[in-house]
Amino acid sequence: MQEVNFDEVLEKILAHDPRFARDAYLFTREALDFTQKLVSRENKGTVRHVTGQELLDGIRQFALQQYGPMTMTVLEEWGVKNSRDFGDIVFNMVESGLLAKTEKDTRDDFQNGYNFTDAFRKPFWPQSKANAGKNPVTGGI
């Protein structure tokens, strides 16, 4: 079996689907590695396939760790505007043989991920702004 050259395959993906920057694919691959390590730690060293929702959570954590308050700016620069975009990036890599999936994995796994403002901006808001609109007694709206 011939080994897949990531850079060559990525160039083909970018030519076929230019919506996302090269760095978005590189970041997503690194975020997958990050997520697999998190899941492995949680499962006492057992490596297993991660779900779309687990990957989205790992992407969120990794992005905040890497880019902090600039995360949304970086993602927007790369053409990534919502969780569905990460699904498109992942499945572009799956369809090109760079990543594997199970029969249960679909693009829809990324459909209702998270609101980017809540995930990437809100953690850096002052406490007063983050709590705006919440009921001070119950914490809810």
Image (tube, rainbow, N blue to C red):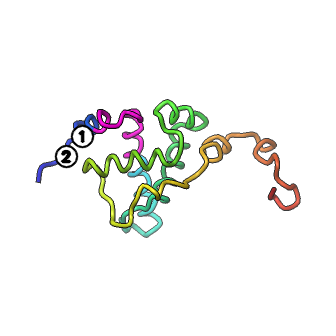
Q: At 35% from the left edge and 37% from the top edge, which residue is drawn?
A: 17
Q: At 78% from the left edge and 41% from the top edge, which residue is drawn?
A: 129
**Label ID, residue 51:** none
The quadrant of the rendering that contains the C terminus is bottom right
Q: What secondary structure is marked by label 1? A: helix
**How far from the left and from the top, in percent, is residue 64?**
55, 43
**How far from the left and from the top, in percent, is residue 82?**
53, 44
Decide if residue 26 is on the left or right side of residue 8.
right
Q: At 49% from the left edge and 38% from the top edge, which residue is drawn?
A: 80
Q: Residue furthest left?
A: 1
Q: Nearer the viewer, mark 2 or mark 1?
A: 1
- Residue beneath disc 1: 9
Q: Earlier in the sequence, mark 2 or mark 1?
A: 2
- Of residues 58 and 101, the one nearer the viewer is 101
Crowding around mark 2 (Cα neighbors within 10 Å: few <14, some 14 to 19, many 20+) is few
For marks 2 and 1, give the CA distance. 7 Å
Q: What secondary structure is marked by label 2? A: loop
**Label ID, residue 4:** 2
Q: At 53% from the left edge and 39% from the top edge, which residue is drawn?
A: 81
Check contact, mark 2 vs mark 1: CB within 8 A: yes
User: Residue 102, located in which quarter of the rendered image?
Assistant: bottom left
- Of residues 119 and 93, the one nearer the viewer is 93
Residue 66 position (above or below residue 43): above
The quadrant of the rendering that contains the N terminus is bottom left
Name the chief secondary structure element in magenta: helix
- In the image, the segment drawn in magenta is 13-30
Tell me which amino acid carries mark 1.
Answer: Val
Indicate yes or no whether the magenta region holds residue 85.
Answer: no
Tell me which amino acid carries mark 2.
Answer: Val
